[in-house]
Image (cartoon, rainbow, N blue to C red):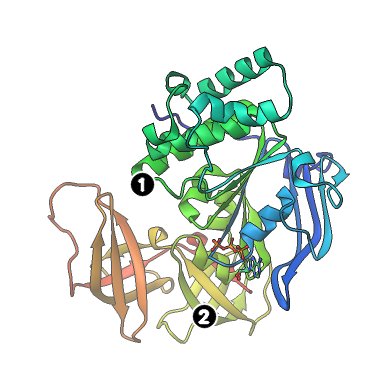
Amino acid sequence: MVHQPVRQQSFAPWNDPEARPLIRIEGVSKSFGTFVAVDKVDLDIYPGEFFSLLGASGCGKTTLLRMLAGFETPSAGKIFIDGVDMARIPPYERPVNMMFQSYALFPHMTVAENVAFGLKQDGLPKPVIRDKVRAALELVQMGPFAQRKPAQLSGGQRQRVALARCLAKEPKVLLLDEPLAALDKKLREQTQLELVNIQDRVGITFVMVTHDQEEAMTMSARIGVMRAGLIEQVGTPVEVYEYPATSFVADFIGTANMFGGVVTADAASHVVVRSPELERDLSIAHSGTLPVGAPVTVMVRPEKMTLSRDEPAADWNWVQGTVSDIAYLGDISIYHVALASGRRVQVSQTNLRHGSEQRLTWDDVVYAAWHPANALVLTQ
Ligand code: ATP
């Protein structure tokens, strides 16, 4: 059964100056020889938060996660968990548990024995172990599979057992390294929601590493977008998608049409940008001020544009071109529009109707237009 995430909309401790972070990362760097894998990262993660570190391969996200777990030592900076400096605390004494991509289940043990393993090592009494194993397996809906061996389970079931094993130990923080990478797309999407629901129920802080932006968007309360060892932006999924702080984030999260230009006018409600790539000016609604002459990038998401065969009446915010490619994805179609300048623009349109009546097609001359409130000016 697929549950919808029930995370409270009001959960935003990062906006509360009184809130105390559970994890505080202060100026943490990690070098391997001369190579800087993590570069002076500052980050606070709050109790009960589902936080994702998102970035391309090699950006340093796993290294940062491993430093939280204690498997790597920072070259500089400090990590505090629940107010305690982790510098001298070995991995097994930290209030964290890590779920590995490979799940690392013991093949010769049953599901129940796998979940019980860490609890036995902690020397807990047998009845306590039995209760905790039962509760953890129920949480991930694997109770009926308690006596099976890992080889008798599907990938998704193994993933749930690995999760149960981590949760049974009731860590303050669960670290997840690409937890769903081994699952196929459909199962991954279903498991994403299950994982969010479980996190919501147990209230444990989750820190997940992923390179999959959709996964990070679906699951996280906040996302830290990493590039080359640096955190470029920390924000809610809505913030990083709708208000990316840099061109890199705009491009990395989703698809973005970006137009380079300079500011030619700055009014109270909007800014005007001239882009050499476009025939018409860009008008962007904004709340700050920008100096005339400043070089900027204007970003418009494909779904924020409309596509039509009719020329818009406005003097700004539209381009004319020909449809050069169409990607039909069922629910939406993505139109690639080639402008006279050679520039290409992507516009996505929801396929509201069956059939192809009135549908735009290859080589049609079209106009892509957007509202000033649907574009964003980026200065970095
Ligand atoms: P991926 O998604 O591919 O796992 P990542 O963002 O998690 O990537 P990291 O594993 O953190 O990346 O690695 C960051 C960089 O540090 C990479 O360039 C990697 O080659 C390098 N690196 C990681 N561990 C070591 C090590 N033990 N020795 C030398 N270089 C390392």
Seen from the viewer's position, the closer of residues 184 and 227 is 184
> Given the image, on which type of amino acid does mark 2 rest?
Gly
Q: Earlier in the sequence, mark 2 or mark 1?
A: 1
Quarter of the image with the N terminus in it: top left
Q: Quadrant of ligand 1?
A: bottom right
- Say above or below: 314 vs 135: below
Secondary structure at badge 2 equals strand
**Residue closer to the observer: 258 or 209:** 209
Q: Amino acid at mark 1?
A: Asp
Residue 54 picture location, percent across and down? 57, 57
Q: Could you tell me residue 166's position as x and y percent?
A: 61, 34
Q: Residues within 10 Å of mark 2 (few under 14, many from 20)?
A: some
Q: Give the side of residue 281 with respect to residue 153, left or right.
A: right
Q: Which mark is residue 341?
A: none
Crowd around label 1: few <14 · some 14–19 · many ≥20 (10 Å) = few
Q: Secondary structure at mark 1?
A: loop
Indicate the position of residue 192 as horizontal and vertical percent values: 47, 40
Relative height, residue 213 to residue 273 (above, below): above
Badge 2 residue CB within 8 Å of ligand 1: no
Q: Which residue is mark 2?
A: 260
Q: Which residue is mark 1?
A: 184
Q: In the rendering, at what x and y percent does residue 116 appear?
A: 60, 26
Residue at point 86%, 42% (across, down): 83
Residue plotted at (64% across, 64% down): 60
Q: CA distance from mark 2 to mark 1?
A: 38 Å
Looking at the rendering, which quadrant does residue 307 occupy?
bottom left
Q: What quarter of the picture does the C terminus occupy?
A: bottom right
Label 1 lies in ligand 1 vicinity (Cβ under 8 Å): no
Q: Please tell me which residue is depicted at 45% across the width and 50% down the height of the picture.
A: 181
